[in-house]
Image (cartoon, rainbow, N blue to C red):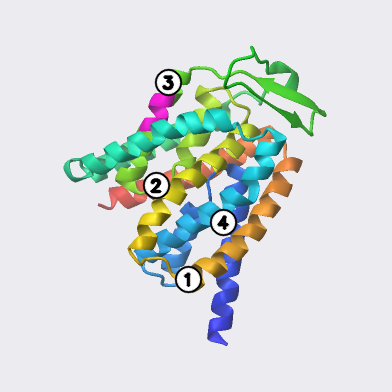
Amino acid sequence: MHEFFRIVGLLIAGAASGLIGSLLGLGGGIFLIPALVLIFKVPMHSAVAAGLVAVIATSSAGGSRNAQKGLANVRLGMTLEVATVLGALAGGLLAPSLPARLLGLLFSTLLLVVSVVLWLRRRSRDAGEYSARGGLLDGRYYEPAARREVRYSIKRLPAALAASMAAGMLSALLGVGGGIVKVPVLHLFCGVPMRAATATSNLMIGVTAAASAMLYLTGGFVPALVCATVSLGVLAGSRAGLWLARRLSEGMIRRIFSAVTLIIAVLMLRRFLAG
């Protein structure tokens, strides 16, 4: 009976992380890993492996559908993903020589600023206020709230590439998920509408997680029962997140993301200030 309740708990944890992850483009691992460690007493390395599997499941559940609908900007996402991978490699090489505590404090402060900027940002532009110049990376999708197609152009690509590289480096140095940085980069730097930014982020983090998960698999850290149970919950939660995303306004998604970012920033500050 104890094992039954454990499985039910894992399903619920997976569903909750999948819902939030698919809705906000965060993947869900950043919520699932602490739950596995603190509530279900899963060893840290195994929890990280399960979190990566959950990210892959979240990305797979909505990636193809979002790409078909045009919500996920595949060309832009893969372009920025190259910079992210390079940054992650650099972070892995620099990790032994850089003070993780100082980097963590700086990163947490940056997240606080991003959260405030997103929250105070003037209302999301109406569908008609976006425009596209016909660039290679420009995107378009159907906005159900406005009942029309939204076209947008990509801005400040060099700055976005630099920010993506920094995100990959910080991810490798601090063990934080890339989605928490990728969504603000896509929205604030590139001018991608929030709905498309979260969908594109979900696609990107799935690619990153797949590469990382292979390392944990070869190292024997992947707990089969935990991963299988959590993945079932994640798939169900991701479907619910996609359904909810279609019914929320872009401004509401932005403010929810801002609130979640604030919570994560405060928790990270507490962790690194405690030393």
Helix, strand or loop under label 2:
loop
Helix, strand or loop under label 3:
helix
Q: Earlier in the sequence, mark 2 or mark 1?
A: 2
Graded by Cα atoms within 10 Å as few (under 14), some (14 to 19) or many (20 or more), the crowding at tag 4 reads many
- Tell me residue 266's x, y (percent): 42, 46
Reading the image, the residue beneath label 2 is 176
| Cα–Cα gap, marks 2 and 1 | 23 Å
Helix, strand or loop for the magenta stretch, by majority:
helix
Whether residue 126 can be seen here: no
Residue at image coords 20%, 40%: 98
Reading the image, the residue beneath label 3 is 159
Assess whether residue 140 is covered by the magenta stretch: no
Reading the image, the residue beneath label 1 is 224
The answer to whether the residue labelled 4 contacts the one labelled 1, judged by CB atoms less than 8 Å apart, is no
Disc 2 residue type (three-letter): Val
Q: Earlier in the sequence, mark 2 or mark 3?
A: 3
| Cα–Cα gap, marks 2 and 4 | 15 Å
The answer to whether the residue labelled 3 contacts the one labelled 4, judged by CB atoms less than 8 Å apart, is no
Q: Which mark is residue 183?
A: none
Question: In the displayed structure, does residue 224 sit left or right of residue 7?
Answer: left
Q: Quadrant of the N terminus?
A: bottom right
Q: Earlier in the sequence, mark 1 or mark 3?
A: 3
Residue at image coords 58%, 19%: 136
Residue at the far left: name it.
97
Disc 3 residue type (three-letter): Ala
Look at the image and give the residue range highlighted in magenta: 161-165
| Cα–Cα gap, marks 3 and 4 | 30 Å
Q: Which mark is residue 17?
A: 4
